Image (spheres, rainbow, N blue to C red):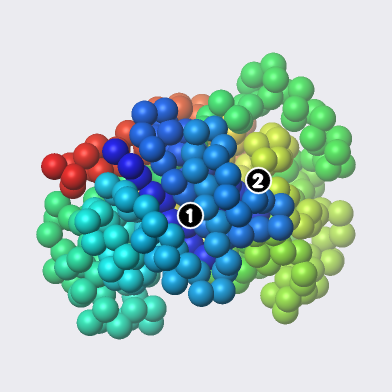
Amino acid sequence: MRIAFICTEKLPSPAIKGGAIQLLIDGIAPFFAEKRSLTIFSITDPSLPIYEIRDGIEYVRVPKEQYEQHIANELNKRTFDVIHVFNRPANVLRYKQAAPNSRFVTSLHNDMFSPMKMKRDVAERVVAEVDLITTVSAYMKRTVTKRYNVPDDNIQVVYSGVDATRYMPPWTDEGKQMRNDMRRRFLAEDDDVILFIGRLSETKGVHVLIESMNHVLAHHPKAKLIIVGGKWFSDNRPNEYVRFLHRLAKPYKDRIQFTNYIPSEHIPHVFTIGDVFVCSSQWHEPLARVHYEAMAAGVPIITTNRGGNSEVIEHHKNGLVIDDYASPKAFACAINELLHDKEKALALAYEGRKRAETAFSFANTAEQLERLYITICQ
């Protein structure tokens, strides 16, 4: 079976500049390369060749400008059994013209079928033409099936995954050593570290998390919020919201620390500094992949009941889920609970790690996708 993965036009593959889709592809690609022919299409990057074969995987990179047309031209030159279009369902229509004999899968990592992103007649054509739609959460599946008549067999939830072997839980010898080293590097040796990792955008709710610190510090004076990320995956240039966050954090002095963007390969080490990890999403998050990473790292998780987040984080089982997502006090109560009750925090972390190793491994994601590819080719 010859398989093609088509990335979005935002970031290159492999995930040298991060990106949830690119990280997912990096994780599942080796499993397909073991027994299938795999080609990955993405945008060019100055640090990557236009064409290469790496670890048995063919990479084809085209300019970001007129990306869709460039990809269609490349598809004309090759033959694939399955073409998987990541998070750009509307592009399927052009790609199918270029490869009419291929089976097409499109995966939804955001609400790309929203009327604000795709006209209804285009969406209906995509639903009719595509062989399979996968979604990163049941929530995302519902956003499609509420609007369009999609046969149940033609839309499947496929959760993302993580390579748990890259993460060092704090109860392991390696994790303890890395934790000590990283906490020295971040000047947080004696602190209770609350960790945020993600893009600095209003939808991610970093401002609410900063506002919660007044209530946290009243109970835990050694608490320190470390905010990892930039306005975009590899872009640390400030914008209005980032400047607002720095103004909001200024009164807290060294109790709030911004690191800017940290490359994805270093993130497993960064997780070791955390006593609590918080996903403060304010929007209907499709399902942030950082949850998988925090579970693998063995850090107790606090998240919001927005979108698909609560599908992988169960309240009081492998994390805490906040309903009152816009309330700084709600975040502070959850943070204080886990900083106070270390035994409970550790139990949540253990369960999260177990689920990362079993239910949410990249191997599971790849196996599920392969079964679906085989089914649509029969």
12 left or right of 86 in image: right
Report the residue that reaches farthest toward the front.
77
The residue sitting at the top extreme is 173
**Residue 366 versus residue 252 in the image, above or below:** above
Q: Quadrant of residue 328?
A: bottom right
Q: Please identify, in this view, whether the residue under mark 1 or under mark 2 is nearer the observer.
A: 1
Q: Is residue 105 left or right of residue 344?
A: left
Residue 77 relative to residue 102: left or right: right
Task: Residue at 87%, 59% (x, y): give it.
Answer: 253
Q: Residue at x 46, y 39 (%)?
A: 29
Secondary structure found at label 2: helix
Q: Residue at x 16, y 64 (%)?
A: 150
Residue at which label 1 appears: 41
Q: Is residue 10 above or below residue 2?
A: below
In the image, residue 10 lies at what x, y percent? 56, 64
Please give the residue where the numbered disc 2 appears in the rendered image: 264
Q: Position of residue 133 (x, y in %)?
A: 26, 57
Q: Position of residue 176 (x, y in %)?
A: 72, 23
Q: Please say whether residue 129 is visible from this viewpoint.
A: yes
Give the percent coordinates (x, y) of residue 204: 57, 64
Residue 331 or residue 258, whichever sits in front:
258
**Crowd around label 2: few <14 · some 14–19 · many ≥20 (10 Å):** some
The N terminus - image quarter: top left
Q: Can see residue 24? A: no
Do residues under tags 1 and 2 come within 8 Å of each other at their CB atoms?
A: no
Horizontal relation, residue 84 to residue 257: left or right: left
- The three-letter code of the residue at mark 2 reads Ser
Up/down of 52 relative to 233, above or below: above
The amino acid on which the numbered mark 1 sits, given as a three-letter code, is Phe
